[in-house]
Structures are given as C-alpha cells and as structure tokens.
Image: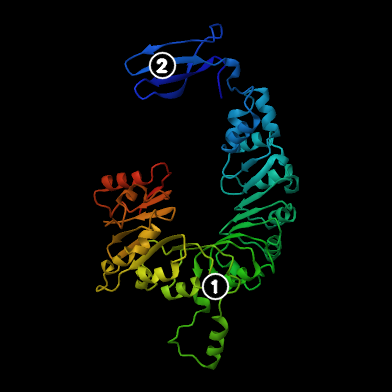
Amino acid sequence: MGCKQCKIFTTKHENYKTKSTIIEQNSISIPNNEPTQILSNKINSNKQIKFTTIDSSLLPTLDNLPVELIYYILKQLDTYTIFTSLYNVCSRLNLILHTYDQYDLNLNSISMSYFYHICSLINPGQIISLTLSDGNDNIGLVKLFLKKFPIESFKRLHSLTLVNIDNNEQMIKIFLSITDQLEILSIKNSNEYYNDTFIDILMTSLEKKSLYKIYLDIEKNRFLNSTIIWPDKCFLKEIKLIGFCNITLFRTILINSPYLKKFQAYDIDLDDEWIDDDDDDDDDDDEIEQHQMLPILNTSNLISLSLVYTRNEMEKIEWLLTQFTQLKYFKYLNIYDFSIESIYESDYSLVDGQRWEKILYNYNQFEFIFTIHMDDEAWNFHNYLPTFQTKFWQDKNWNIAYEQYDRILLIYSLPYPHDTHYYDCSTFFSIAYNPFLLNKSLQNVTKLRINMTAVNNLEKRVSKILVFCFGKVLIIKKAD
C-alpha cells in the first residue's frame, strides 16, 4: 500500500540532440528527518537528469488511500484471503471490511476451523455470492451454516451455488427462502435423488423475474422425466444444462424463455424427433414426422449455442442451425475417451469445411472438436484439409489443428476449446495458417490425461504440452 518513509521522485531526461523530454517516476527510502528536496544533476553528451522528491505526506498509505480503491482491491481477492490476511491490519481497514458489501463466500471444501472463523466475522447483509456444499470434506456443514444464518437473512444475495446437497428438506427450505434479488442459480449434484416436491419448487423458482442465469448439473435423465413441467414463462437469459438433453426439451425451453440469449447443453440428442427418409413409414409415421419436424419456434433472440459431448450427424446440425437467424457464437464438441471403443458410426461430412461455410457465414466465432473413427481405410482426411484453408476461414481467422491417434482423428479449432485434453500415442500436429498459435493452442486446458504406456519419448512431449498450458493447473493421470 505504501510506506511513510518511501519517497517518490521524478526523473527528467532531456535529450539535447532531439530537444525531447522524457519523465520517469522512481522511488527511494529516505528518513523523515532528511530534507524533502534532493537535486542531482548528471550531464553527459546526450542528456541531463534531474531528481525531485515529493513530500511523504502526499504519498498513498492505508491511512489515506481512497476507499473506492480499497474496494477494487477487495473484489480481486477471495473471502478467505480477506479475513486471514487483511483483518486486524489496522483500525481503518477493519472498518472498511465491516462495511464492504460485495463478499463472495465459498464454503466448498473448507476446514471446520476456517468455517467457524468466517462465521464469527461475516454479516449476511454483506454477502452477494454464496456457495454451500455438503461434499465429502464437509458433510453436515450446510445444516450448521443455515442454523446460524438462514437464507432469508442474505438480503443482498445475487448468486447462489449448491453443491452435493442431498437432503430434500434442506433444499426445499433453501428455495422457499430465496429472495427476489437472486440473479444466478447453480445446482451441482449429478448423483442426486431429489423428490418431486423439490423439483416442482425448483421449476417454480425459475419464474423469478430477477433470475437471469441458471446452471443445473443434476441426475442424467432428470429433465427427460415427463412429470417435470418447465415454467410457462421465465426471464432467463443464460441456461446451462449438464446431463442428457433432447430437442423436445430444447424446443420447450425456447418457447417458454423469450429472453434467452445463451444456451449450453451437455450430451444433447437430436434423435428423439428425427426420422430418416429411408425408414419404412406407415401412415401413422408420416403424421408423426410431419408434426415433430416442424421448425423450432422462438429462436430469434438466441445469440450463443454450445453443444458439448454431443454425437450428431452433419445433416442434423444443418437442420438445427438454420433455425437460428441471430446466432453469432456456436460451440460443437464431439469428444469422448479414446480408450473406449465408440458405438457410434463416424460422420465424415463433419470435416467438410465447405458445408460449414454455408451455415456459418454470419457467425463471429466457431469453436469445435470433431472426433472421427476412421473405419473406412480408403477415407483420407488430407482430401478435406483444403476445405478449411479457403478465404472464408482465413477472413474469419478460424484456425484448426488435427491429431491422429492410430485410427482416431481429432480435429479442433484453436485454441483447444475444452478444459480437458486426452493425450495418447504418437501424434501428428498441424496448424493451418499461423504457426505461432502453437504456443497457445492448449491454453484453455486445465486437466491433462496422458496414456503413460503409449507415449514415446514422453519427457520431450510432456514438456512441449506444459509450455502450451503455462499458467494453468494441470492434472496428469496415468492411464488404467
């Protein structure tokens, strides 16, 4: 923050040849009893340097630093750091901490000693973001916390994240107490067994006018249950669903969410309404096809669509994307574990850049991963590579890379658009336009799995990958 014995002085360089002047700022430590003015002239053939000190009373310290600047610093820190490193530093800072009202309190995977310490210092009215968890590291913590601080006491709560809370009674109590200020809601519990009562309350909560963003990672087939009724009208602008989603559910969400701008789904399926032309259809099938393949309604507001862990043919993607006239961002990640034999037949048309051009010409960003099992020995990706090197792809500045693992081909946009990367046997790597992107190609990767038994010259390859991910935390696992 500052030191009362620290002096700041300016250095003025005058270049007599160019008649130009450059001002620099420097600092030195000077005892308070020394004069506040120091001049030093150094003359050489090109420049003259002058030093002028500033009175120490004008320097910023914790005693005179504007509170707005301290608030800005606090926003960059987590609550644990604030209360363990800044509390009791000085009386003024304590006063600021007691009046600061933008705390993000995360109680996921914390020790009980830290939990009790935080509970002794926080004021619910100062919390705008709260994460509660009953995971393996802190079973029973949510019950203790809610007994001391009921949800309704968080009057300014804007974001709520609930992690691995299995107790239906607790979840119902939380949702019945949520204030009308809540803007962001996240539930992360992929192994949940919530009852119908809670699910009904959850669906009702989605109708809150203040709520604009939800993240739901719950039991895989939960949203396909016919007993779940999506609210007739909600004001959501962003939806992220982890688990199984189909086009019927997607269609319902769009109809009932007129303000929706961004939608992201993991493991989405377009097959539930798709009937191939070569199927043997009777009259009833014709009637179903005519009804189910009607255009998707209410697509005009969506600008961002992300489909992750998806396996759909190019024909279905073309049918889907042509429905969205305002879409500017599209992410399509067709990825799965290389060590598991695929039960799906690869669609080679996914790597036809010309077909993508026809549906992406108005898009600003396209991120993708295509995983192709090369079952046809006569098929050669190099025949398709030129379709990604046309003027269209260059003008968009969309660069691609590809890696080959025996009979598996991985093709992706740069930088790699997923947080997890599987690194197996020998790899052939290519970048279409800009070789300098190589150093940033895996900058989004935070988890790296390496097949230790299959990689040749491992030390050299791992070092190369770690350079890509500089500044990230990597998890390197040994293949089973």
Image coordinates for residue 78, horizontal then vertical, percent: 58, 38
Q: Amino acid at mark 1?
A: Ile
Decide which of 343, 403 is in the foreground and name it.
403
- Is label 2 in a helix, a strand or a loop? strand
Residue at horizontal 54 percent and vertical 16 percent from the top? 54
Residue at horizontal 32 percent and vertical 50 percent from the top? 438
Q: Marks 1 and 2: in contact by CB < 8 Å?
A: no
Q: Earlier in the sequence, mark 2 or mark 1?
A: 2
Left or right side of 308 for 201: right
- Indicate which disc residue 49 carries: 2
Q: Is residue 340 visible?
A: no
Residue 36, relative to residue 213: is it above or below?
above
Decide which of 115, 336 is in the foreground and name it.
336
Q: Quadrant of residue 114?
A: top right
Residue 206, relative to residue 374: is it above or below?
above
Residue at horizontal 54 percent and vertical 14 percent from the top? 5
Left or right side of 136 for 407: left
Q: Quadrant of the N terminus?
A: top right
Whole-number angstrom distance, CA of label 2 to CA of label 1? 72 Å
Image coordinates for residue 225, horizontal then vertical, percent: 61, 71
Decide which of 415, 138 is in the foreground and name it.
415
Q: How many numbered marks appear? A: 2
- Indicate which disc residue 247 carries: 1
Image coordinates for residue 277, horizontal then vertical, percent: 45, 86
Q: Quadrant of the C terminus?
A: bottom left
